[in-house]
Image (cartoon, rainbow, N blue to C red):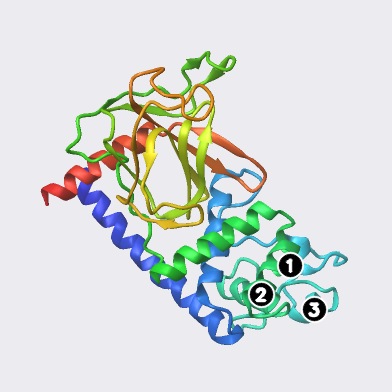
Amino acid sequence: MFFPAFAQAKEEQDVIYEKRMELYKKAETVSLIPWYYFAAIDQYERNIRQVRRDIPKAEGVLGIYIKPQIWAGPLNKDKNDTNPFTISQFGGLGIDGNGDGMADRNDDEDVIFAIARYLQSYGTDHEHIKIALWDYYQRSKTVDLILGKGRIYKKYGTLKLDEHAFPLPLYANYSYKNTWGDARGWGGRRIHEGTDIFAGYGVPVRSTCYGIVELKGWNKYGGWRIGIRDINNTYHYFAHLNGFASYLREGQIVEPGMIIGSVGSSGYGPPGTSGKFPPHLHYGMYKDNGYTEWSFDPYPHLKYWEREEKWKKRK
């Protein structure tokens, strides 16, 4: 019953993707700003909504949330104002995007065209859009996350980028259990922020997602490690590697199943330290909520991706 339900959910998600893309393309037509910028902003906002309690759940297919005081205007006493004229008089962001005479911040077309007009007021090239995003969010990491998503959408030309892969090839001899939250002593008392997957030296390590290599190098705890940021604001962390794929570099776009390195036992010391523990991959996941970032348990995701990949191979 699990996989038929999964297939049905995928079909429903595809319909939503089509509706979103239609809105992005409409905004592109009127603003001359490429659709993938709107997709990136929307995806960032959607994922923020999913992990924050101070933002209401989305009512439409878009996830963009514009605060009432920004939509209606900072000096507008009516924070729920839907009159396009009075909103404009108070310098609000809200506009009537669908021609119904109302500027409704819960209407997808009104919202996407309001964002389009805001970005367009700065300019339509990348640098001006970057400035517009900074002025709106006032957070450099948020700007980087959005622009990173835009690069990924531009490269693949689709919104259907929710595929994942298990970090090791299924044919490899590996084992793992839920070790997230376990105590760790080296370097001071701390908890284990990941799942350890034990395997032999040199077993290929693969990207689990579509994303951008945010970090590559040495850490005294994690040894040779890689950090990949996906389109869901999630940071995927691969540590204790034996080495990196020769073509891998920071800023590179990767996809599920792409080899990024190999299993090792590096870490717990200065650069080059290895062999202080059995070879394994430390895999961690971290979520950004627009303010900060925290670790969460990757084990359920690993089990799901492993099951899903096995099912696909049987088809």
Residue 305 in percent (x, y) is at 29, 42
Residue 45 in percent (x, y) is at 58, 57
Q: Report the residue that reaches farthest toward the right.
A: 75
Callouts 2 and 1 close, C-beta under 8 Å: yes
Which residue is painted at 52% across and 66% down in the image?
A: 150
Give the residue number, with chain letter if any, for mark 3. Answer: 88
Instruction: State the separation of the CA atoms marked 2 and 1.
Output: 9 Å
| Residue 60 in sight here | no
Q: Identify the secondary structure beneath mark 2.
A: helix
Which residue is painted at 69% across and 54% down in the image?
A: 140
Tell me, for residue 114, which label it has, or none: 2
Give the residue number, with chain letter if any, for mark 1. Answer: 71
Q: Identify the secondary structure beneath mark 1.
A: helix
Which residue is painted at 74% across and 56% down in the image?
A: 138
Q: Nearer the viewer, residue 220 or 29?
A: 220
Counting other residues with Cα less than 10 Å from the Cα at mark 2, is it few (<14), some (14-19), or many (20 or more)? many
Residue 194 in percent (x, y) is at 44, 29
Residue 273 in percent (x, y) is at 46, 24
Q: Amino acid at mark 3?
A: Ser
Q: Amino acid at mark 2?
A: Ala
Q: Report the residue that reaches farthest toward the front.
A: 272
Q: Nearer the viewer, residue 239 or 290?
A: 239
Instruction: State the separation of the CA atoms marked 3 and 1.
Output: 10 Å
Q: Amino acid at mark 1?
A: Trp
